[in-house]
Amino acid sequence: MDGLFPSPLQTLASPTETEGIEMVAISDVQTLASYTWTKTLGRQLLSQAHRGFGRLPSCPSQFLPIEDNRSSIKTLTDYLIIQCFLFLPLWTLLRQTDYSGLKLIVRFEVDACKEETAQIVPAPALRQPGDMLADALSSLSLTSSTSPPIRPIQSRDGLDVIRGGHDVPQGSLIKIKTRSNSSSGGFPGAPQYLQLMFGQTPALYVGIHQNGRFTTIRECQLDEMESSFSAKVQPGLKKLSRLLEEIRDIALERGRGAQLSLVYQKKVSPDLQVMERSRGKSLLPDNVLRRFAA
């Protein structure tokens, strides 16, 4: 494993004891940022064709960090031929959540949003590069401040942040799945419920097809799925809570500046290995890394 010392610091088995852990719930969800990368600052920002995700769309997709204490999404979406929703091409969202007392930052992909509720609203002025995401990673708390209008931010270290985009209401986000007519029975299940729960995505659209021809779109709501799956997934969520606590304790024990990675090799071992990264030169300048120092 490149960049890692050969021997694990610690091996973590799947927890077996979950006594004392109350029912796991996600709360205090705060959107931190959405982002993508562009190679050049001085040109028009266009959508990029990601491998395996089709060709370039006809409209630009923009990105930006999101103002604190707002449950909204910032992006400019592209229309599909089907006019019931908008498509977000490989768009990534970062959120801070409270996982039964543990503060987590979760990254996940957003598929689409409902057209009838996706009101495009110009984004307000945002903070200058403190950076909100860096602040959240170091202190896991958000603060508000006043800033000048949105504009490209050029840094002396060569890392440029381009801010822009539009609001899409949180309640309009949807997850998209497809199933053949012969395999659609019993779908969605617990794995799909967990995807919606961790991302707090309110709806799932399932396209049912016969030999590639779509005949039905089935809509499932997160709150309606809770009665079927919430109790079933609690044992696994409690084990995850215990495992996250162990990982947190290891990181605190190693102290400030520790460079740790979690490695899971299903075909090698069912356990999770805590590995230490070799202290080679970082791809980011030191003054950028200091923004994320714990």
Image (cartoon, rainbow, N blue to C red):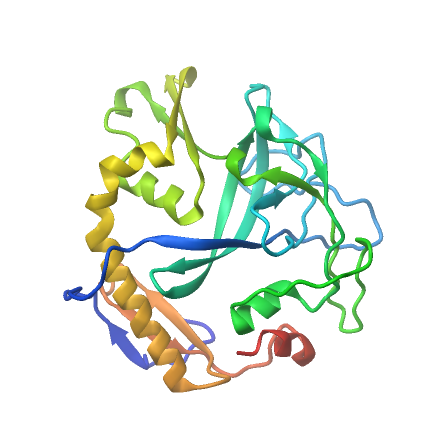
Residue 41 vs residue 254: left or right? right
Image coordinates for residue 184, horizontal then vertical, percent: 29, 24
Image coordinates for residue 176, horizontal then vertical, percent: 45, 32
Question: Measuring 25% from the left and 43% from the top, which residue is drawn there?
Answer: 230
Which residue occupies the foreground of this view, 228 or 53?
228
Q: Is residue 267 visible?
A: no
Residue 231 vs residue 60: left or right? left
Image coordinates for residue 44, horizontal then vertical, percent: 81, 44
Q: Residue furthest right?
A: 42
- Quadrant holding the N terminus: bottom left
Residue 137 vs residue 41: left or right? left
Q: Is residue 128 visible?
A: yes
Residue 194: quadrant of the picture: top left
Question: Measuring 69% from the left and 69% from the top, which residue is drawn there?
Answer: 130
Question: Measuring 45% from the left and 55% from the top, which residue is drawn there?
Answer: 28
Q: From what the image shows, is residue 84 above or below residue 14?
A: above
Which residue occupies the foreground of this view, 54 or 214?
214
Residue 226: quadrant of the picture: top left
Q: From what the image shows, is residue 92 above or below residue 52?
A: below
Question: Measuring 74% from the left and 53% from the top, which residue is drawn there?
Answer: 163
Image coordinates for residue 219, horizontal then vertical, percent: 40, 25
Q: From what the image shows, is residue 74 above or below residue 27?
A: above
Q: How many marks?
A: 0
